[in-house]
Image (tube, rainbow, N blue to C red):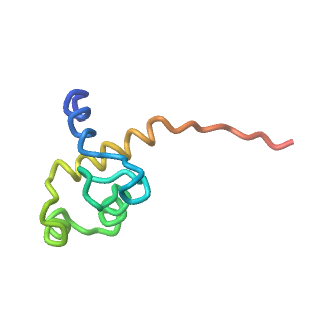
Amino acid sequence: MIMQLDKTKLLKRITVDPKVMVGKPVIRGFRITVEQILEALSAGITLLELQDDYPFLEKEDIEACLAYAAQLVASEKVYILKRA
């Protein structure tokens, strides 16, 4: 489990700017979104393959994407709907 201090430091790598990628969360201001990285990882692309495509990516950038996604899921609210 990531310690809170490390997680906070990692999440600083994720930036949001309306002028970059229409305000989607990106890695360190680059024009690569958290969504792109998560999609690539879910498709089985490895860190090494990602770094071949995006040489500026660091291992911590990938960890930041995963921490960001975990944070979103953790704050997600689930409601039980009852049928009438």
Residue 12 pos. (x, y %) = 25, 39
What's the residue at 36%, 56% (across, down)?
A: 20
Q: Quadrant of residue 22?
A: bottom left
Query: Percent position (x, y) of residue 66?
Result: 30, 48
Residue at far front of view: 19
- In which quadrant will I find the N terminus? top left
Q: Residue furthest right?
A: 84
Q: Quadrant of residue 3?
A: top left
Residue at screen point 25% across, 69% down: 45
Instruction: Please tell me which residue is depicted at 34% across the width and 58% down the height of the picture.
Output: 33
Q: Residue at x 38, y 55 (%)?
A: 19
Instruction: Report whether 5 appears left or right of 31.
Output: left
| Nearest the eye: 12 or 75 | 12
Describe residue 66's horizontal placement relative to residue 18 as left or right: left
Residue 2 at x, y percent in the picture? 23, 34
- Identify whether 47 is placed above or below 69: below
Residue 50, above or below 57:
below
**If the image is split into quadrants, where does the C terminus sit?**
top right
Q: Could you say where residue 46 lies in the image, as x and y percent from the top left?
A: 20, 66
Question: How many dots with numbers?
Answer: 0
